[in-house]
Image: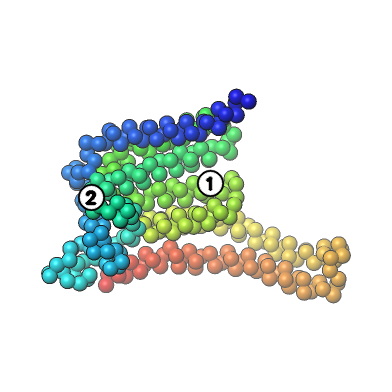
Amino acid sequence: MSGAPRRSLAPGVVLAGLLAIFALSVAAREERFGTLEGRGHEWLTGSAVKFTRNWHREGAWALRFAMLENPRSIEFSTLRDREPYVSYPVGCLLPIYAVSTITRREPSPAMVMSVNLAGQLVGALAVFALVLVALESLELGFALRATLGALAFMLYVFLPGPFYWLQNVYFSDQAILPFVVIAILLEVVNDQAPRPGWMRLQSWVVGLGVFTDWFMVPVAAMLLVKKLPPQLVNLPIEFDASRRAAPHLIAMGVITPDEQRAVRRVMQAAACASLAGTLTSFPTAYHYLVRPRRRARDQRVA
């Protein structure tokens, strides 16, 4: 009886330990928190502050969620005069705008860095879960998988690159990382325990990721390509099953010989539906993943 409570407490203890480790990393970076003085890349954080301050002061809807380089003034009277920045999607700014709206405080470097740290925590926890789930197929014990996952967690937090970038520097390149890791995690989870809900959730994550940074486009393409081989392999099985179904149904007395032709057509239509689903995945991927990027590029050229 004592073993069951210990096992049930283990995930909570591990989570508390990971949160404590992350809190130590935040304390170690406190000296540079909230300041834009650094190695030169903090100007990206400054851009996030500038764009979201415009939204906070004038309303994001009124500005059409545009990332404007210049404040409203007599010199810059229209949105075009204020030089909209269109090279990247605006999704990375939405968390900052949401925090500023909820707290009713103007965006600041400290607020942006807090959002950045929150994203790093989510990404690190997703990395831990990814290792934990991926190693389950090797039939390793929870303690060993949790140890290896915690090691991956600490690498994601304490390596020099993420230790600096994922606090002090924030824009699309940093905001996209949790979406990428979560999308891969959901793919691994679905491979081990397939459920439609996992794929629906992954679709939302990928959609939000594309709205955050274009890097999600090749990631989504990779996930799509991974799904295509099983579908292509399954197509001959579908057609063969459709061809053999009618004779079996007649032998079992489910249908009469006169109904065989109609049943065969229905079964062939079902097989063609699988073929159509596979073929339409390519233009669907183009529509949702490639066209937005081309549209942004055309706007930038114009």
Residue 202 visible in the snapshot: yes
> Is 154 drawn above or below residue 297 in the view shown?
above
Residue 85 visible in the snapshot: no
> Between residues 285 and 60, which one lies in front from this camera angle?
60
Question: Residue 142 at what x, y percent from top left?
Answer: 54, 32
Residue drawn at 33 percent across, 66 percent down: 296
Query: Dot 1 corresponds to which residue?
Result: 188
Quadrant housing residue 280: bottom right
Q: Can you name the residue that lies furthest to the top here? A: 2
Q: Amino acid at mark 1?
A: Val
Residue drawn at 39 percent across, 35 percent down: 19
> Is 156 drawn above or below residue 290 in the view shown?
above
Marks 2 and 1: in contact by CB < 8 Å?
no
218 lies left or right of 228: left
Mark sitting on residue 108: 2
Mark 1 burial class by Cα count in 10 Å: few <14, some 14-19, many 20+: some
Q: Amino acid at mark 2?
A: Ser
Helix, strand or loop under label 1: helix
Helix, strand or loop under label 2: loop
Quadrant housing residue 273: bottom right
Mark before the other along the chain sequence, 1 or 2: 2
